[in-house]
């Protein structure tokens, strides 16, 4: 079929009218991305336009890749020559050619977030400023905002408004840091992410000849997700398109969700001013979702004031109602979701890849990941790391590990100067050398530091040793949760993260809190007899050691934050954690603007679903180590009640441990108006499930470890060896994998079968 036949009339208008400025602002799922894609194919096929002269900008690499593949289907290999990618990728490419004009080497380095932060730390230190006031994240987000608003350090320093703001925030030296930071990057021949846009703007501003060249080269410029471009990005595309005026932008003001990063909805309003002859096209038919989902989304977004009016309708079938799961706890919520995915797979003959689980904050992935692992459902986290791989989680786990085993060298190295306590890499080297020369273990070397370290360093190390000793006492004296809390506090990690109020810092703090919640949940679970921190770590090693999806496995359930889900679609979407203070987030309830942005996020989430949407909330959730009662999100009340189905908990099946307390009745205030349906058909599901081994929290028959149980040095383990594990008993090592970040052993246990264990956690004793 001709590609033009796969378009409705307004879509076709967007595709075939290739000349001049075009703006398409339309609702979710109405084919905006499809129009962009087909427009590019049409330019090449019908007009013979050279792909080298087409620039197409998208928001994520994933979106760019999908678009390129789609175009390739129409035009073949030539699609490779398109200038297509994220703003950062495309302009980094141009800067490679031109940056000598700005004084950079063409092989300039791109600093990632870590490089950036460590440079800021260094500068703060050199300036002898208080690093508690001048936190790298906070400093950088200020610099980043300035750059994205195209404010140079010179302008920053001379602008009394910035100065006043910084003084009010107790950071009067910010302008000076900005200056030094830029100078240092420049001297190092490096650009950070924001520089890629900032410098492209400078290049085009100060070098009209260069601008002229690219203006002529790129005859066609296209931008997807236009609502989320920031000032700096918009200015670049505006300049590039100024000569040919062949610019096509598509977006949806109702899906603008990056105001916090400087994305500016004003761009949409400015576009018509900047390109007065622009053709505007309305797309109103949604092709993605059932009418139930479209109607729910329309009803929700209508609650926002001040938006471009749109009527979105669909010819698609009504489809199933939206299931609403009310769970007793977050753990229960996660289990019901895993169960729901399994059931939906069976019922519809769908695959893992047809499912997405969306959440508002990264920390929520912990319980979801756990439930999916237990249910043997492969998943991947898009745009982030798996919970136990996140830096702050590994940091705190390192402290747990040392408290249990002070010889754990990796954990010592990781934690010794975290947060900063004046023990640099040189000191660490000296400690290691001493340990090697004296043939003592690391812990002994640390305790004898006065023998070989100068006074100041020795004081710092002594402080660390004293702290670890107190932690060692704590793990003996208290249950896992109390010990974990004390360690988190004593380490100084919590304080440091708490003080960081940037978006990223808050997320990291939430993650650490979530780890403590996991410990609490573990302790509260009656099935766990051993309440020690040691036992908890064993549990974690089991969970994280289970083989998970390979990188290239396409058939996986997608887990991601709603922010990452923009533009994507899945047959069945689970939208989780619909509770007040979580979604909408506490931080977004203070003004109407914030709440409206949060509602747009809700709209984005709903509109990812093609066939089926399931929403869920928990009535209790661990927060700060306490089980708190949650209220269902106000957003749920904004979904037309007739479209909802209150799913009942299926009592026949359980994915492991019981949820702590609570009933499954609908909470008053929200349930009143809902149609009552049976939701998930528990019985049929249970039947399916019974035949399937469901891993549970406690499949393990108690094993009484030998009286003299001490773990062997992991370095001595070898394949084929017989070993004993405190909990799983005796077994044989079938496979050892010492490569990679997390060395593992696969052990075939006599009682419990094969388990993959992380060597850094699992205590295995070689049985002679
Ligand atoms: N005319 C059409 N006929 C059949 N399917 C269509 C048509 N237009 C779009 N679609 C399909 O509808 C779905 C949504 O389209 P697309 O992703 O382009 O929408 P969008 O407006 O970009 O959505 P979002 O706002 O979420 O980014 C896709 O699966 C697409 O292939
Ligand atoms: Mg799209």
Image (cartoon, rainbow, N blue to C red):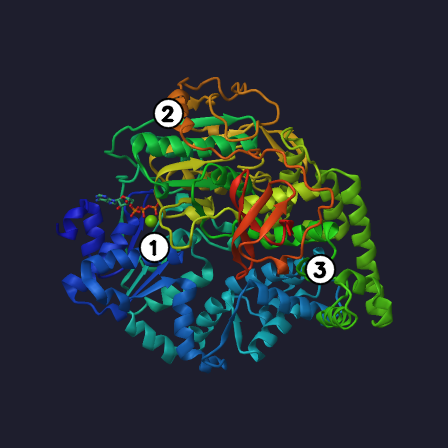
Vertical arrangement, residue 244 with respect to residue 275, above or below: below
Would residue 349 be found to the left or right of residue 670 on screen?
left
Q: Name the residue: 48% across, 80% down.
A: 102
How many labels were placed on the picture? 3
The disc, 1 or 3, on the residue closer to the chain's N-terminal end is: 1
The alpha-carbon separation of the residues under discs 1 and 3 comes to: 59 Å
Q: Is the Cβ of the residue at disc 1 closer than 8 Å to that at disc 3?
A: no
Q: Quadrant of residue 118?
A: bottom right
Where is residue 172 shown, x and y percent of the image?
71, 63
The disc, 2 or 3, on the residue closer to the chain's N-terminal end is: 3
Vertical arrangement, residue 764 with respect to residue 118, above or below: above
Where is residue 596 shown, x and y percent of the image?
49, 40
Q: Alpha-carbon neighbours of circle 1 within 10 Å: few (<14), some, or many (≥20)?
A: some
Where is residue 452 shown, x and y percent of the image?
83, 72
The residue singled out by tag 1 in the image is 272
Would residue 629 be found to the left or right of residue 689 on screen?
right
Instruction: Identify the disc placed on residue 412.
Output: 3
Q: Nearer the viewer, mark 1 or mark 3?
A: 3
The residue singled out by tag 2 in the image is 643
């Amino acid at each position: 079929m001709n590609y033009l036949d796969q378009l409705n009339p307004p879509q076709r208008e967007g595709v075939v009218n290739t000349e001049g400025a075009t703006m398409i602002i339309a609702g979710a799922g109405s084919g905006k991305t499809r129009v962009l894609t087909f427009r590019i194919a049409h330019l090449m096929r019908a007009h013979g336009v050279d792909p080298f002269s087409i620039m197409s900008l998208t928001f994520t690499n994933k979106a760019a890749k999908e678009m390129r593949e789609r175009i390739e289907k129409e035009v073949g290999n030539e699609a490779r020559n398109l200038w297509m990618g994220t703003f950062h990728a495309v302009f980094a490419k141009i800067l490679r050619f031109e940056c000598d004009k700005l004084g950079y080497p063409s092989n300039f380095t791109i600093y990632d977030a870590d490089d950036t932060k460590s440079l800021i730390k260094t500068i703060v230190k050199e300036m002898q400023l208080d690093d508690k006031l001048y936190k790298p994240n906070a400093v950088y987000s200020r610099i980043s905002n300035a750059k994205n608003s195209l404010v140079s350090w010179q302008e920053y320093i001379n602008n009394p408004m910035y100065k006043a703001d910084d003084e009010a925030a107790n950071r009067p030296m910010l302008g000076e840091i900005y200056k030094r930071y830029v100078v240092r990057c420049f001297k190092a021949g490096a650009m950070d992410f924001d520089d890629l846009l900032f410098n492209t703007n400078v290049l085009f501003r100060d070098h009209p000849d260069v601008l002229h060249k690219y203006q002529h080269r790129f005859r066609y410029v296209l931008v997807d997700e236009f609502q989320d471009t920031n000032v700096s990005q918009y200015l670049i595309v505006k300049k590039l398109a100024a000569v040919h005026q062949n610019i096509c932008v598509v977006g949806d003001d109702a899906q603008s969700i990056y105001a916090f990063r400087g994305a500016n909805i004003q761009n949409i309003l400015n576009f018509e001013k900047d390109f007065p002859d622009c053709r505007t096209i309305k797309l109103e038919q949604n092709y993605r979702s059932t009418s139930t989902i479209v109607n729910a989304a329309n009803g929700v977004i209508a609650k926002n004031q001040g938006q471009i009016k749109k009527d979105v309708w669909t010819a698609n079938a009504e489809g199933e109602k939206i299931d609403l799961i009310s769970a007793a706890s977050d753990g229960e919520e996660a289990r019901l979701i895993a169960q729901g995915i399994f059931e939906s797979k069976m019922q519809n003959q769908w695959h893992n890849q047809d499912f997405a689980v969306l959440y508002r904050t990264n920390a929520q992935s912990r319980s979801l990941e756990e439930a999916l692992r237990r249910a043997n459902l492969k998943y991947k986290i898009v745009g982030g790391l798996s919970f136990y791989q996140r830096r702050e989680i590994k940091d705190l786990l390192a402290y747990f590990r040392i408290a249990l085993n002070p010889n754990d060298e990796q954990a010592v190295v990781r934690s010794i100067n975290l947060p900063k306590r004046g023990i640099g890499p040189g000191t660490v080297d000296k400690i290691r050398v001493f340990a090697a020369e004296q043939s003592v273990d690391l812990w002994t070397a640390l305790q004898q530091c006065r023998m070989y370290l100068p006074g100041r360093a020795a004081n710092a190390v002594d402080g660390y040793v004293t702290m670890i000793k107190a932690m060692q006492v704590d793990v003996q004296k208290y249950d896992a949760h109390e010990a974990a809390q004390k360690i988190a506090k004593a380490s100084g990690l919590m304080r440091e993260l708490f003080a960081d109020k940037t978006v990223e810092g808050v997320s990291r703090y939430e993650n650490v809190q979530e780890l403590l919640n996991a410990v609490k949940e573990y302790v509260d679970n009656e099935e766990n007899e051993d309440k020690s921190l040691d036992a908890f770590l064993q549990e974690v090693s089991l969970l994280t050691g289970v083989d998970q999806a390979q990188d290239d496995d396409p058939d996986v359930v997608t887990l991601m934050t709603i922010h990452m889900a923009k533009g994507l679609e899945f047959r069945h979407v689970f939208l989780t954690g619909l509770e007040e203070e979580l979604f909408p987030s506490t931080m977004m309830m203070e003004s109407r603007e914030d709440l409206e942005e949060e509602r747009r996020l809700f709209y984005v989430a709903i509109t990812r679903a093609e066939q089926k949407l399931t929403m869920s909330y928990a009535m209790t959730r661990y927060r700060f180590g306490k089980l708190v009662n949650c209220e269902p999100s106000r957003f749920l009340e904004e979904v037309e009640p007739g479209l909802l189905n209150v799913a009942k908990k299926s009592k026949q099946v359980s994915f492991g441990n019981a949820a702590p307390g609570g009933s499954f009745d609908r909470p008053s205030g929200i349930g009143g108006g809902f149609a009552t349906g049976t939701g998930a058909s528990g019985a049929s599901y249970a039947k399916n499930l019974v035949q399937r081994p469901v891993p549970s929290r406690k499949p393990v028959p108690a094993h009484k470890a030998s009286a003299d149980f001490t773990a062997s040095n992991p370095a001595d383990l070898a394949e084929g060896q017989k070993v004993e594990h405190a909990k799983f008993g005796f077994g044989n090592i079938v496979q050892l994998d010492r490569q990679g970040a997390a060395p593992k052993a696969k052990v075939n246990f006599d009682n419990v079968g094969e388990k993959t264990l992380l060597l850094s956690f699992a205590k295995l004793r070689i049985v002679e």
